[in-house]
Image (cartoon, rainbow, N blue to C red):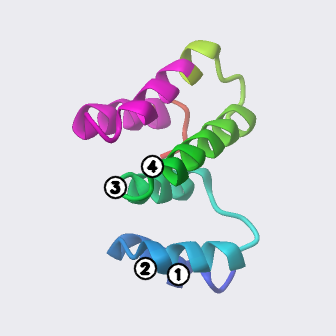
Amino acid sequence: MSVAYPVFRAALDRGDLPRVLTLARQMPVIRLSDALEVVLLMRTGDESRFDRACVRWLGRFALEVPDVSLEELQAAAAALDGLPDRPDEAMAQLQRICVERGVA
C-alpha cells in the first residue's frame, strides 16, 4: 500500500466521503474491502452515483474473487440494491458473502 493509505483509511473510518474520494483518486489500488466501505458511505448521497459505485464494486467482485458463482453475484447485487431501504439486512448479507469469499 502507498504512503497515502493510512490517511485514506483514517478518512474512511471517519466517514469523510469527500476526502475519501479525493484520496482514492491518488491511490494506485483500492482493496475490494475498502471499495465496499466507500460504497457504503455513498448510500445516502446522490442515487445515480451510488448506483454506479455499486455496479463497479460488483464488477470488481466478479473479476477479483476466484471462482465466484452467479448465485453469489446475484446475492451481492440484491444486497447492494437493498442498502438504501434495508441497510441492516443488506449489510449483514454483504458481510456474509464477503467473509465467505475472503473479502473481509
Q: Nearer the viewer, mark 4 or mark 3?
A: 4
Q: Residue at x 57, y 49 (%)?
A: 53
- Residue 13 lies left or right of residue 102; in this view the side is left
In the picture of the structure, the residue carrying the numbered disc 3 is 44
Please name the amino acid that badge 3 sits on. Thr
Q: CA distance from mark 4 to mark 2?
A: 25 Å
Q: CA distance from mark 2 to mark 3?
A: 20 Å
Q: Nearer the viewer, mark 2 or mark 3?
A: 3
Q: Nearer the viewer, mark 4 or mark 1?
A: 4
Please name the amino acid that badge 2 sits on. Ala
- Mark 1 Cα-neighbour bin, 10 Å: few <14, some 14–19, many ≥20: few
- Magenta span: 74-99
In the picture of the structure, the residue carrying the numbered disc 4 is 47
Query: Is 92 rendered above or below residue 13?
Result: above
Of residue 41 and residue 72, the one placed in the foreground of this image is 41
Query: Is 96 rendered above or below residue 51?
Result: above
Q: Please, what is the dominant secondary structure of the magenta stretch? A: helix
Query: Within the image, what quadrant is residue 29 found in?
Result: bottom right
Q: CA distance from mark 3 to mark 1?
A: 25 Å
Secondary structure, mark 4, is helix
Sooner in the amino-acid sequence: mark 4 or mark 2? 2
In the picture of the structure, the residue carrying the numbered disc 1 is 6
In the picture of the structure, the residue carrying the numbered disc 2 is 10
Q: Is residue 89 visible?
A: yes
- Mark 4 Cα-neighbour bin, 10 Å: few <14, some 14–19, many ≥20: few
Q: CA distance from mark 4 to mark 3?
A: 8 Å
Please name the amino acid that badge 1 sits on. Pro
Q: Nearer the viewer, mark 3 or mark 1?
A: 3
Secondary structure, mark 3, is loop
Q: For the residues labelled 3 and 1, say whether their Cβ atoms are less than 8 Å apart.
A: no
Q: Position of residue 3 (x, y in %)?
A: 65, 86
Q: For the residues labelled 1 and 2, say whether their Cβ atoms are less than 8 Å apart.
A: yes
